[in-house]
Image (tube, rainbow, N blue to C red):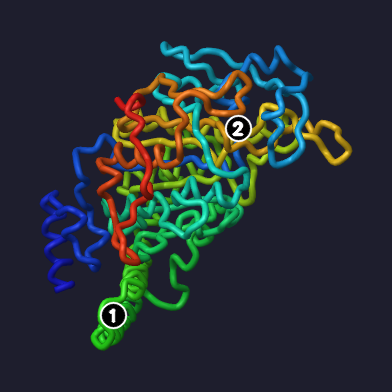
Amino acid sequence: MGMGTLGLAGVLRAAGVAPDASLVSEPASLVPRLPHFAPKAKRVIHFFLNGGPSHVDTFDPKPALAKYAGQPLPGEYLRTERKTGAAFPSPFAFKPYGQSGLEISDAFAKTAQHADDIAVIRSMIAQVPNHEPSLMLMNCGDSVQARPSVGSWVMYGLGTENQNLPGFICMCPGGYPIKDAENWRSGFLPGVYQGTFIDSQHSELEKLIENIRSPHATTAMQRRQLDLLAELNVEHLRGRGDDTRLEARIQSFELAFRMQTDASDAFDLSREPAATRAEYGEHVHGRQTLIARRLLERGVRFVQLWHGAGQPWDHHDNIEGSLRTHAGQIDQPIAALLSDLKQRGMLEETLVIWGGEFGRTPTVELGDAGKAKMGRDHNPYGFSVWMAGGGIKGGTVYGATDEFGFRAVENPTSVHDLHATILHCLGFDHEKLTYRHAGRDFRLTDVEGSVIRSILA
């Protein structure tokens, strides 16, 4: 039955038709599938600024901080993870951009040229001021329990349009970020939906993707090895019944074999014109962003671009120098991507997301001796995330923090709301995209979440 379904899936795929996710058996779980309704977006690229970017220095201007510079703020503004002091005005200049007049700081001056494509949510809220649970909340929808990641849910719902590349790819230069592969885990979903990690600090294919080529076997030899392995696995299953873990392992072997050709093409930036490479930037963030565009146009569903291992955006001190450096590394690639997607007619079907796990305080962080470190502490009470592209109404602002940027006071927006909106752009009712596990139907948004309809096109 499984082989028959695979054959049927191939016929349907060739005809441009695929059944609903609930009608597809596990062996055919990676075939492209139809969402609940006609989607605006078909793919996602997520710029993840791990560490927590400061919203009051990027996309949420707070002139009151300059007015009260050096003055103590009310007590509630001091309830942070570490000791903070007086109001700390942003060292970055904000100004309006585009016809919409969206205010953005000069830290992202190139991205700001696309202000009319961007919808900024200025009232995001997390749950705790710690990296690990906030990373899990933003990436997996739960800060405590082990849950599948957003990309895994997207794969479960939509499948992949390229059977020769992973449908969900995470690139992070320098190795794993904090919480490692838990950020792109499949959790209780079948393992075929888990993200594939790539250390994008490398430029050579053999280093980008481990074991992409065998030094010992020809392609024909590998094919015979996999056929023998398949026979052994079928024999193993015959006496034990279905096992989604084994099914995921079988598919991973087959995918690795098929990737040898397609990955060589997708990750080879020498095939891009020199002008395009220069537009993105001849550095790691420019390279990984350009690779991401090449992956998206080849049918990869979900690409997550991490800024780097550790917490690059955890600016507890010297925020002016550190944030300017880190923003400078991705501002050009983001702007280049938005321009490139527009030129190729892909932006209206690609959902672009920017943000981290929380924001930063409007007050200056104090060191052990009570001296200002000229940085900001963690702030989960109000921060910014922006989206652009498929299904998003650009040039818009949703929600607001208070006059100093500490707490969301207008339309507080949970991570569940954000996830519900992402799924909506992809054609899913977030309450109906479920998976039966441990006796109940689970979903990405748990039992909460509302679509942010005012930012939808």
Residue at 54 percent of width and 40 percent of height: 356
- Image coords of residue 322 (percent x, y): 70, 34
**Residue 117 visible in the current orientation:** yes
Residue tagged 1: 230
Mark 1 to mark 2 CA distance (whole Å): 48 Å
Which disc number belongs to residue 400? none
Disc 1 marks a residue whose amino acid type is: Ala
Judged from the image, the secondary structure of the residue bearing numbered disc 1 is helix
How many numbered discs, if any?
A: 2
Residue tagged 2: 327
Q: Nearer the viewer, residue 400 or 295?
A: 400
Q: Quarter holding the N terminus?
A: bottom left
Task: Specify whether 86 is left or right of 296.
Answer: right
Q: Residue furthest front?
A: 75
Based on the displayed image, in which of its 4 quarters is residue 129 positioned? top right
- Image coords of residue 140 (percent x, y): 45, 51
Q: Quarter holding the C terminus?
A: top left
Mark 1 Cα-neighbour bin, 10 Å: few <14, some 14–19, many ≥20: some
Task: Specify whether 101 is left or right of 83.
Answer: left
- Image coords of residue 25 (percent x, y): 20, 65
Task: Specify whether 174 is left or right of 277.
Answer: right
* N-term mark: 1 or 2: 1
Disc 2 marks a residue whose amino acid type is: Ala
